[in-house]
């Protein structure tokens, strides 16, 4: 998908969201003078995030703020309406972002067990190469 196509799709999605918002605000009766405190779509989503979901969301918001807001708003809307009921963990959220061409980068760390405790693979390789050098 070209950059122009992606921008066009994002504009379409944004416009659709605005139209839906306008329609829903017109359909609601304005009986109460006191505005109700409603949760933002982001708050709705955050409540349903599972293991490492918040980490993925924060990385996405930092790296792609505009695109992430559109995805968050749509997910929050689906959750609020009851169409989406499952918890979303970090893996599912990352897969969702990548499926819509938002390539969120995550810090990757591999731990291995050494002498009964977990150490990062890079530390283990560094200490092993240092001990190899001392034996030469």
Image (tube, helix red, strand yellow):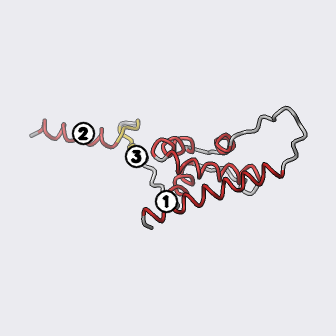
Q: Which of the two marks, 1 or 3, is nearer to us in this view?
A: 1
Marks 2 and 3, how far apart at CA: 17 Å
Q: Earlier in the sequence, mark 1 or mark 3?
A: 1
**Residue lying furthest bottom in this view?**
1
Q: In the image, what residue occupies the spot 45% across and 67% down?
A: 1
For the residues labelled 2 and 1, the Cα–Cα distance comes to: 44 Å
Point out residue 79 in the picture as x, y percentages from the top left corner.
72, 51
Q: Where in the figure is residue 9, as x and y percent of width and height?
A: 54, 62
Front tag of 2 and 3: 3
Q: What secondary structure is found at the residue carrying circle 3?
A: loop
Looking at the rendered structure, the secondary structure element under dot 1 is helix
Any mark on residue 125, and which? none
| Residue identified by numbered label 1 | 7
67 and 80: which is toward the camera: 67
Q: Is residue 58 left or right of residue 45?
A: left
Read off the residue under disc 3.
108
């Amino acid at each position: 998908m070209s950059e122009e196509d992606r921008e066009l799709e994002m504009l379409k999605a944004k416009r659709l969201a605005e139209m839906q918002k306008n329609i829903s605000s017109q359909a609601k009766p304005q009986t109460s003078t006191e505005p109700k405190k409603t949760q933002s779509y982001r708050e709705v989503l955050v409540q349903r995030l599972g293991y490492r979901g918040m980490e993925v969301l924060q990385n996405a918001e930092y790296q792609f703020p505009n695109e992430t807001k559109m995805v968050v708003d749509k997910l929050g809307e689906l959750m609020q309406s009851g169409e989406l009921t499952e918890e979303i963990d970090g893996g599912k959220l990352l897969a969702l972002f990548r499926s819509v061409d938002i390539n969120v980068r995550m810090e990757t760390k591999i731990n291995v067990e050494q002498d009964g405790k977990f150490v990062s693979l890079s530390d283990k390789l560094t200490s092993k190469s240092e001990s190899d050098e001392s034996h030469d």
